[in-house]
């Protein structure tokens, strides 16, 4: 459900950003894998 919402947000945004959908999916994966971490720490931990 979260990934569906992120995908819809990536497509519906008025601002064009190359790779935005991929960034949103990586953020979602990081949030699921590390729910108690700070977003920056979880995202860049890879």
Image: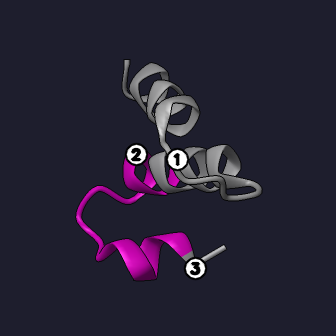
Is residue 39 shown above or below 16?
A: below
Neighbour tally class for label 3: few under 14, some 14-19, many 20 plus, Cα within 10 Å: few
Discs 3, 2 touching: Cβ within 8 Å: no
Q: Earlier in the sequence, mark 3 or mark 2?
A: 2
Task: Please give left or right for residue 38 compared with residue 14 in the image.
Answer: left
Is 37 included in the stretch rendered in magenta? yes
Rendered residue at 67%/58% (across/down): 17
Q: Quadrant of the C terminus?
A: bottom right
Q: Which residues are magenta?
A: 29-43
For the view shown, which residue lies furthest in the front direction? 14
Q: Quadrant of the N terminus?
A: top left
Q: Nearer the viewer, residue 44 or 24?
A: 24
For the view shown, which residue lies furthest in the right direction? 18
Q: CA distance from mark 3 to mark 2?
A: 14 Å
Discs 2, 1 touching: Cβ within 8 Å: yes
Q: Which residue is mark 3?
A: 44
Rendered residue at 48%/24% (across/down): 8
Q: Earlier in the sequence, mark 3 or mark 1?
A: 1
Neighbour tally class for label 2: few under 14, some 14-19, many 20 plus, Cα within 10 Å: few
Image spot of residue 35 (x, y percent): 29, 56
Q: Characterize the magenta stretch by its predominant secondary structure.
A: helix
Q: Which residue is mark 2?
A: 32
């Amino acid at each position: 459900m979260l990934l569906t919402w992120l995908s819809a947000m990536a497509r519906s945004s008025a601002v064009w950003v190359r790779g935005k959908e991929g960034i949103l999916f990586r953020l979602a994966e990081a949030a699921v894998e590390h729910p108690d971490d700070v977003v920056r720490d979880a995202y860049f931990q890879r």
